[in-house]
Amino acid sequence: MYLISINIEYRYNLVKQIREFTSPQSVKVFLPDDLNYHFNYKKYSYIIVENNPKIIDYFTKLHKNIIICCFDDELVKSVYKNKPNIFICRSKKEVIELLISSTNKPSFFPKGLLRKACQVLFVFLVTLFSFYGFTKIDPYTKLHPTQTSTMKKSTNVSKKIDFGKENYVFLGDSITDFYDLEKYYDDLPVVNSGISGNQYGDLLYHLPERVYIYNPTKVFILIGTNDIAFTDITNEELVDRIIEICDKIHKHKKNTQIYVESIYPINNTEDNDKVDLSMVAVRENDRIKEINTLLKQKVTAKKYHYIDMYSLLIDENDNLNLDYTTDGLHISEDGYKVITKAIKKIIYKY
């Protein structure tokens, strides 16, 4: 049995992959608030958590095997190195391989040499699949909302996390997912609820575990570019679905201020080494501008807040500024600096 932190699950979708080589009941997802309640920890062989000293210390005192996922960190604090029962993994592949190697059920494979051969083959196949399937979800792969997020609605989402007077949640797809909030907002309580590949449905169906539990004072929403690229949704339908997300948040968190960012521009300039046309796909700025115009109208009409990031990120040709992008769609460090400056003006009210 494996206990996995909600923060790891919603960012990296490990539950489904672990269950594929164990059983459907092998994994339980826990919220930080769950640590205040009684768990039968004896049945969990591994606890999978982010690099959170408080949580790590909690399970260390229980003498549990702890897997620290540091997928976004090049280095892990030296205090955890070479400690017994603590395993540091820097990729999903490492997590899966570690769990497979720890699984020793007699009935899992046939006995004798055949069993060993099956084990070797199984590890090889999982390793091969991990190269293609356990890395971040390709934001350009057309997936149904139920496929791009495997998080199940927790029965404990009503137990809210209290970060104090202010707390900011960033909700969206890969552009949000790749936004290093701790770097740009090191002095602020921020939560990254972006998941690569997301479309509007992923946000709409998973608000409890991605927004509500954090008691946000402000939510910044950026969604729609994948819907444009991979669905037949109309402009008005897309805008209405984004408004539906806002309405749902407002219904559950009436004091939360909701900010909707314009869909970002793209750059599909041909014969430019920096632009990856396969990534940009069928997105076009003309359509994006049409959607943003309608989005602004409906967002303001509903008394939510609209942020025009589009005009801050374009060049003189109305394309995403090449200095602000890594491939014509995703945002570079310089681009995130521009975005951060605009959002901090809202947060600090200057």
Image (tube, rainbow, N blue to C red):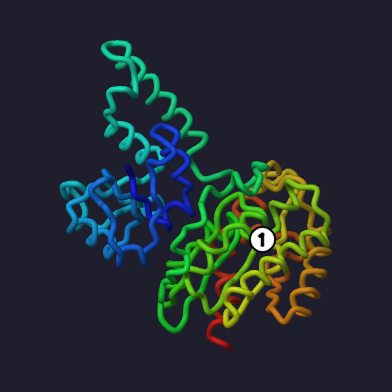
Classify mark 1: helix, strand or loop: loop
Q: How many marks?
A: 1
The x, y position of residue 322, in whole percent, is 66, 57
The x, y position of residue 309, in whole percent, is 68, 70
State left or right for residue 40 relative to residue 255.
left
Quadrant of the snapshot with the C terminus: bottom right
The x, y position of residue 287, in whole percent, is 82, 58
The crowding category of the residue bearing disc 1, from other C-alpha atoms within 10 Å (few below 14, some 14 to 19, many at least 20), is many
Question: Which residue is found at the position 59% from the left and 47% from the top?
Answer: 148
Task: Check the image and name the residue furthest to the top.
Answer: 113
Please tell me whether residue 163 is drawn above or below residue 39 in the rendered image: below
The x, y position of residue 81, in whole percent, is 20, 51
**The image quarter in which residue 243 lies:** bottom right
Residue type indicated by callout 1: Ile
Q: Is residue 136 visible to us here?
A: yes
Q: Which residue is mark 1?
A: 223
Please tell me whether residue 164 is drawn above or below residue 151 in the rendered image: below
Please tell me whether residue 99 is drawn above or below residue 75 in the rendered image: above
Question: Which residue is found at the position 53% from the left and 79% from the top?
Answer: 217
Question: Which residue is found at the position 68% from the left and 75% from the top?
Answer: 307
Quadrant of the snapshot with the N terminus: top left
Q: Is residue 317 visible to us here?
A: no
State left or right for residue 87 relative to residue 284.
left
State left or right for residue 193 relative to residue 111.
right
Please tell me whether residue 178 is drawn above or below residue 163 in the rendered image: above
Question: Which residue is found at the position 41% from the left and 81% from the top?
Answer: 164
* Residue nearer the viewer, 36 or 342: 36
* Residue nearer the viewer, 297 or 317: 297
**The image quarter in which residue 147 lies:** top right
* Residue nearer the viewer, 106 or 215: 106
